Image (cartoon, rainbow, N blue to C red):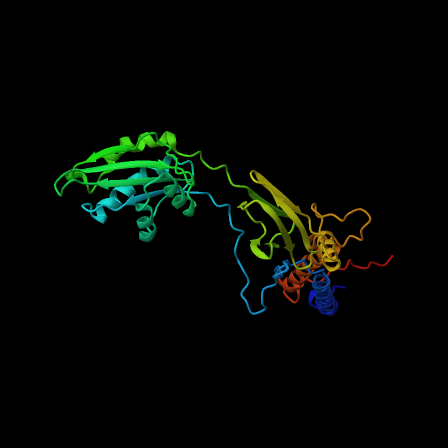
Amino acid sequence: MRLDSRATAAILRPDMHRLAALASSLLFGLALVPALALAQQPAPLVPQPAPQAQPQTAQQAAPEAPAQQAVPAPRIVLPIVVIALPAPLVTPAVSMAIRDAIVAGLAPAAGGRPVVALPDEARIAAIATCHDAICFGARLNELQAITGVIVRTTRRNRTAPLEVRVEMLDPVSGAPRVTEPIVVQIPAAAEAAPAALLAPAIAQMLPALPSPPPPPPTLLIVTNVDDALVTIDGRELGHAPVGVVEIAPGRYNVVVTARGWATGSRMVQVGETGSTRADFDLEPEQQTRVALDSGRNWATSDGDAAPGDSGEETPIYLRWYTITGAAAVVVAIVVIAVVASSGGTEVGPPQGIPVPPITSP
């Protein structure tokens, strides 16, 4: 008795179809597991923009007034003022060229102290009327200058060389910082560019320059929350991190605010010199604390669940349902491929199933 292969295939084909349908259903069900798991993941903590802080001083700005963006004013450094007095036979252009050459020669040696020219013609005319040290000292004190350089330029006639007399005086007293006035002769051909001829006179003034100012005090504010708003006496300094700022000595009310964090506020004393640092360690509010804890528990640094936890901290690609789903996909693909390649296809002529002959005893 021989069983035909076509008959065998006809018997087995319904079972194979049921097996393929079962594998497809299993594949579809397992594919839904990672999607449902992803939907249950805790949302990561998203930083929120810091709110605009309100002024903390007694004098509140009007609601309609724009927010101030100014930094506290730095300490004032008294300048060295160069004053060119007018002369009858000297043109203003020549007088300004001599003045500017002296400013440019003194500035590099002033040690950071500003060297400026006085452009106010009314004040220049008032200083030109002085004939004694007290008058000069009073005028320089009005200018808030640490010292004054008085430049007098005269000429005997229109073709004669210029005679430049330079004095360096203290404010208030008007006492000279150089014993004798420095005199320089400038020929008419060099009036437009007198810097080279004035260099020896400038060199004589350098030892008499006032000492450079000490470095201004600085303030550094450090906080543990990025983008926190920092205000000083109600004026916005910027959002953290804030760099070092120069500031006048004094006592300041520093406020640090950030959404979701408790406000930090305290008085900071800035000394006459040196650097002052103020640290603000803001405490998270309850909602922020919960969000931070959820973010830390979502995944550990090595991808494994922390001791005592439920295992939800394992990365998604290492969880059991992800691995099971991937294995089911592979098995289903293999089963479908085998069924598709073998079902109903014959190779060569049917041979049937050989049955051994039955012999009588």
Query: Which image quarter holds the C terminus?
Result: bottom right
> Foreground: 117 or 347?
117
The picture places residue 188, in percent across and down from the top left corner, at 15, 40
Q: In screen coordinates, is 134 left or right of 234?
A: left
Furthest toward the right, the residue is 361
Left or right relative to 308: residue 316 = left
Residue 114 percent location from the top left of the image: 40, 42
Query: Residue 95 at what x, y percent from top left?
Result: 24, 45
Instruction: From the viewer's side, name the closer residue of 136 and 255.
Output: 136
Residue lying at 69% horizontally and 46% vertically, measured from the top left: 301
Q: Up-down: is 178 above or below 130? A: above
Specify whether residue 89 is in view: yes
In the rendered picture of this protein, how many numbered marks are placed on residues?
0
Q: Is residue 45 above or below residue 217?
A: below
Find the residue positioned furthest to the left: 159
Check the picture and name the quadrant holding the N terminus: bottom right
Q: Is residue 103 left or right of residue 224?
A: left
Residue 4 visible somewhere in the drawing:
no
Q: Is residue 53 left or right of 154 when viewed as pictured?
A: right
Q: State the image coordinates of residue 65 (x, y, percent, origin top left).
A: 54, 67
